[in-house]
Amino acid sequence: MNQHDSNQSTDQQRFKRIHLDEMTPDQKIYFNGLMSGPVSGTGSKGVVQGATSLGAPFNVLLRSPVLAERLRKVGEYLRFESSIPKRLNEFAILVTARTWTAQYEWYAHLRLAIKEGLNPELATDLAQGKRPKNMQPDEEAVYNFCHELHTTHQVSDAHYKAVLDLFGEQGVVDLMVVSGYYVMVSMVLNVNRTPLPDGAVPIPEL
């Protein structure tokens, strides 16, 4: 069955949940770091306070706990401390999710992007594989940079300069790395065949 079937049950995921009682010491370090970190306060379905297991992508990464713990710190920076404003950071994540047709990533970050002030109409266009209309100048700079990077694996001088002028060299690095990090997350979710919650509408295949 295709990973994008929203009716998939959780037992069709490739990586079963590991209960806290079954975790190794290194896995517990990662688990406790997530539970005490900022992700647990976002309402993430993967990390719920008081839970005794993790959802994807965290449950998948738990299989390599030392790697997972190091990635946790990278992810927390990119989500909560990046020099890119949160509205635009979440927009960049949506561009990545759309490129990979990462259904769960799209679902999870769509609500965060809208919460941070992204116009829902931009997301509607993006979900359909269209260049979003009526973008603000900073949104257009982020879209152009990320879309070109994902689709051509390069960035033109004009699109590079637009991000550089807005956010400086740190911003260029943060935007590149958040795009790459969420490619990794997309891979994890897609290989796991992470299902959408009941009632969630999948983005179409392109």
Image (cartoon, rainbow, N blue to C red):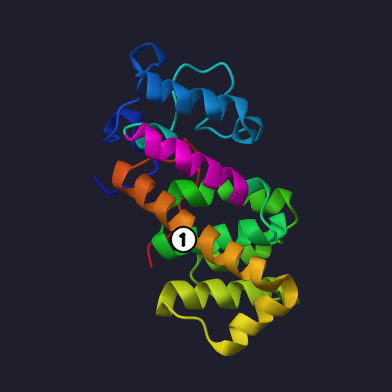
**Magenta part of the chain:** 64-78
| Residue at image location 67% in from the left, 59% down from the top | 120
In this view, the residue in front, 72 or 196, is 72
The residue most toward the left is 1
The image quarter containing residue 38 is top right
Q: Amino acid at mark 1?
A: Gly
Describe the element under mark 1 as helix, strand or loop.
Answer: helix
The image quarter containing residue 50 is top right
| Residue at image location 39% in from the left, 24% down from the top | 26
Q: Which residue is mark 1?
A: 180
Dot 1: few (<14), some (14–19), or many (≥20) neighbours within 10 Å? some
Q: Is 68 colored magenta in this rendering?
A: yes
Q: What is the quadrant of the N terminus in the image?
A: top left
In this view, the residue in front, 126 or 159, is 159
Is 155 situated left or right of 61 in this image?
A: right
User: Is residue 43 visible in this depiction of the protein?
Assistant: yes
Magenta span: chief secondary structure: helix
In this rendering, is residue 163 above or below 16? below
Q: Position of residue 39 (x, y in %)?
A: 60, 35
In this rendering, is residue 56 above or below 206? above
| Residue at image location 29% in from the left, 33% down from the top | 15
Q: Position of residue 25 (x, y in %)?
A: 38, 19
Q: Position of residue 74 (x, y in %)?
A: 53, 47
